[in-house]
Amino acid sequence: IGKNDTTISTVEHLLAAFVGSGVDNALIEVEGGEIPIMDGSSKPFVDAIQNVGIEDLETDNDYLIIESAFSFKDEATGTEFVLSPANEYSVTTLIDFNSPVLGQQYAQLDSITDFNDNIASARTFAFLHEVEQLLDNGLIKGGDLDNAVVVVDKELSEVDRKRLAEKTGKTSIDVQKGILNTTALRFNNEPARHKLLDVVGDLALVGKRIKGKIIATKPGHTANTALAKHLKGMYNKQRKLRGVPKYDPYIPPVYDTMQ
């Protein structure tokens, strides 16, 4: 997100924590150009919010209400969303990366009030070939892989393991059920849960609470933010019908650089 020449990246995990915690009014101060990755999930932010507590405001909540069912598809990415009316905010994600390790996965959040318990701790993930490319390009400074689930999508020889251990600063590298031994899965479907987390965080860019059911097939940041812009337009149409001035937060273009 940004304004003029100032931008802040990697905001979705923090925004998801706010949505899951019922916070829609907060001042965030950041040093640098991105929100810290922490452990790759929303959990550290949720814990911090719970530690300081939440103050109720007298202003009534305003909602974007999904009034009728419709679908939204991003042709470039193949992502598809199906939205339908509901009394509260619920999200389902379905993912398929053609990976024998991950397989086809889905995650379901029946109510946003369950986000902190069931979704917040799901961490970001990446495939080993993506991580190696970043390492070869001098990124992932320090080789810290503890804040991401690394899916091993190829056979690793002993030479490969030693080379990867040197690159990442680990004493040894091993593979456990297709996952690099730098971390263990918190859920069997942790990647699908993290994709759900990202949907919640990206759709927070709409700027209003949502009442509706969303089913997302193969979601990603680019498609999520495209849907956020579409929903913002819907919200403004609802406001116009009520004779309320246009609501116009800036939603910048987003490009997928991580899962």
Image: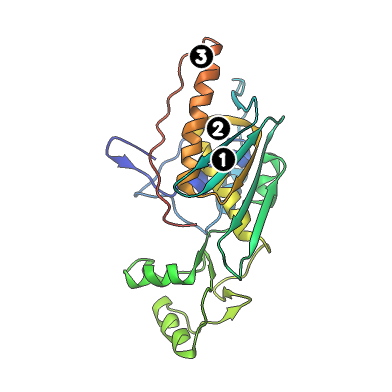
Res 77 visible: yes
Q: Is residue 15 above or below residue 141?
A: above
Place of residue 25 in the rendered image (x, y in percent of width and height, measured from the top left): 52, 31
Q: Is residue 52 above or below residue 232?
A: below
> What residue is rendered at 41% in x and 41% in y?
29
Whichever of callouts 1 and 3 sits on the residue coming sooner in the sequence is: 1
Task: Name which residue type carries label 2.
Answer: Asp
> What residue is rendered at 45% in x and 18% in y?
246
Mark 2 neighbour class, 10 Å CA radius: few under 14, some 14 to 19, many 20 or more? few
The N terminus: image quadrant: top left
Q: Which residue is mark 1?
A: 18
> What residue is rendered at 46% in x and 14% in y?
245
Place of residue 227 in the rendered image (x, y in percent of width and height, measured from the top left): 51, 37
Task: Name which residue type carries label 1.
Answer: Phe
Whichever of callouts 2 and 3 sits on the residue coming sooner in the sequence is: 2
Res 122 visible: no
* Mark in the foreground, 2 or 3: 3
Q: Are marks 2 and 3 in contact (CB under 8 Å)?
A: no
Quadrant housing residue 60? top right
* Mark in the foreground, 1 or 3: 3
Q: Please state the total of marks drawn on the protein image.
A: 3
Whichever of callouts 2 and 1 sits on the residue coming sooner in the sequence is: 1
Instruction: Measure the C-alpha gap from mark 2 to mark 1.
Output: 7 Å
| Residue found farthest to the top | 243
Q: Which residue is mark 2?
A: 24
Q: Nearer the viewer, residue 255 or 149?
A: 255
Q: Secondary structure at mark 3?
A: helix
Q: Nearer the viewer, residue 153 or 195?
A: 153
Q: Which residue is mark 3?
A: 240
